[in-house]
């Protein structure tokens, strides 16, 4: 717990009470309406789905709130759709224009990611107090474009440091009302997690490769079992890395004299839920996604504690100018992942 918090800090669990079947019914109705309306209803679907999940997430009896409106999302999605249609038509008839458009999109992606973070957080509230994001555009280009390029050029050796810097940029620029969050992160933990994940993946893969060389020579390629084993090992390595980093970030995250967090996510439980969720989604042809989403949210909520000071009871909601939904929807439309951990 953050040493800056007062001695009368109280500990609260995060209660996530969403029902798998209840959310599935909401999700499937929204999916059907989205298909019937050729995607137009997707903005309403997102708001309804998010409001349901947030509304069933409580801390000390107070629910999270999602405050975006469907029309805010729809405007951004329509702009993104027009640009996507232009790109697809250009790909078919004017490849040079399509290539230039792709470069433009790649160049503006860090900007869109920042606007997406600003929009998502500013439309999230707790006790009627909105969150916010103050990260600079320059910081976004450094952390979302230049540093990942460095990670690739270093053949992955710098990637734990890159993820450390990116996580530091995101979590140290989050606001809750006028209170700034601070993330006390250690690059050593990121490298430790990276080395563990690398060993879990590479050592067995090398052994499998050496043991299967004769089989590969006879079959003209790697056996199917070896391919599946490699995917499974990557899945395990990624999950272990994610759990270590998630716990480290949450345990170092606080807002001075207001709140801090404690995460005790267990690798075994996370792997079990991830594996069973993957089977649920695959064997239901994707229709089991809402069930998987509720199960994962429940796991993460159960693994997290919130340490609150009495100061949180005196918070007053402040009004602020809202960002456009353009950034959030554009980033989602072009598959820019805003999640680091």
Image (tube, grey):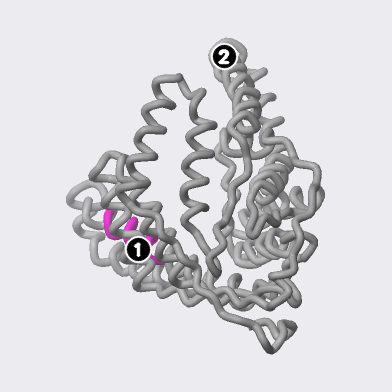
Residue 187 shows up from this direction: no
Relative image position of residue 198 (x, y in whole percent)? 46, 68
Q: Secondary structure at mark 1?
A: helix
Quadrant where the N terminus lies?
bottom right
Label 2 sits on residue = 89
Q: Which residues are magenta?
A: 228-237
- Position of 321 relative to 33 (above/below): below
Q: Is residue 278 left or right of residue 162?
A: left
**Residue 174 can be seen, yes or no:** yes
Query: Relative to residue 92, is residue 262 depicted above or below?
Result: below
Q: Quadrant of the C terminus?
A: bottom right
Instruction: Return the mark for residue 193.
Output: none
**Along the horizontal axis of the image, is 103 left or right of 333?**
right
Give yes or no for residue 229 being in the magenta stretch: yes
Categorize mark 1 by other alpha carbons within 10 Å: few (<14), some (14-19), many (20+): some
Horizontal and vertical percent position of residue 146: 72, 51
Q: Main secondary structure of the magenta part?
A: helix
Which one is in front in this view, the residue at disc 1 or the one at disc 2?
A: 2
> Measuring 69% from the left and 24% from the top, which residue is drawn there?
100
Q: Quadrant of residue 154?
A: bottom right
- The structure residue drawn at horizontal position 33% and vertical position 50%, both measured from the top left corner, is 291
The residue nearer to you, when weighing 104 against 242, is: 242
Compared with residue 323, is residue 85 higher up or lower down, i.e. above or below?
A: above
Instruction: Calculate the distance from the C-alpha at mark 1 to the C-alpha at mark 2.
Output: 40 Å
Q: Which mark is residue 233?
A: 1
Q: Residue furthest bottom?
A: 7
Is 121 in front, or is 265? 121
Expressed as whole percent of the image width and height from the top left, the position of residue 263 reads 52, 75
Q: Nearer the viewer, residue 236 or 97?
A: 236
Towards the viewer: 157 or 339? 339
Q: Earlier in the sequence, mark 1 or mark 2?
A: 2
Circle 2 — which element? helix
């Amino acid at each position: 717990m953050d040493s800056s918090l007062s001695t009368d800090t109280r500990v609260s669990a995060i209660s996530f009470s969403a029902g798998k079947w209840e959310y599935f019914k909401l999700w499937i109705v929204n999916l059907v309406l989205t298909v019937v309306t050729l995607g137009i209803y997707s903005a309403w679907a997102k708001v309804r789905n998010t409001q349901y999940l947030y509304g069933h997430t409580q801390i000390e009896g107070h629910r999270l709130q999602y405050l975006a409106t469907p029309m805010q999302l729809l405007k951004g999605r329509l702009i993104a759709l027009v640009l996507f249609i232009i790109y697809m038509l250009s790909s078919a008839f004017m490849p040079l224009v399509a290539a230039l458009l792709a470069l433009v999109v790649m160049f503006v992606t860090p900007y869109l990611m920042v606007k997406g973070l600003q929009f998502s957080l500013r439309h999230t509230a707790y006790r009627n107090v909105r969150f916010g994001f103050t990260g600079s555009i320059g910081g976004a280009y450094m952390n979302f474009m230049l540093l990942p390029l460095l990670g690739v050029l270093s053949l992955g050796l710098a990637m734990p440091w890159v993820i450390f810097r990116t996580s530091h940029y995101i979590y140290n620029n989050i606001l809750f009302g006028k209170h700034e969050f601070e993330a006390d992160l250690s690059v050593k933990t990121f490298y430790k997690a990276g080395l563990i994940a690398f060993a879990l993946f590479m050592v067995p893969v090398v052994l499998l490769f050496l043991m299967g060389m004769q089989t590969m020579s006879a079959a003209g390629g790697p056996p199917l079992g070896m391919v599946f084993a490699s995917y499974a090992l990557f899945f395990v390595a990624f999950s272990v890395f994610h759990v270590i980093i998630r716990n480290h970030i949450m345990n170092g995250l606080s807002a001075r004299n207001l709140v801090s967090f404690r995460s005790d996510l267990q690798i075994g439980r996370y792997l079990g839920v991830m594996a069973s969720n993957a089977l649920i989604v695959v064997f239901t042809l994707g229709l089991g996604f809402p069930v998987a989403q509720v199960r994962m949210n429940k796991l993460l909520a159960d693994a997290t504690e919130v340490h609150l000071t009495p100061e949180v009871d005196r918070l007053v909601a402040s009004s602020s100018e809202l960002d456009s939904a353009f950034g959030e929807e554009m980033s989602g439309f072009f598959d820019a992942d805003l999640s680091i951990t």
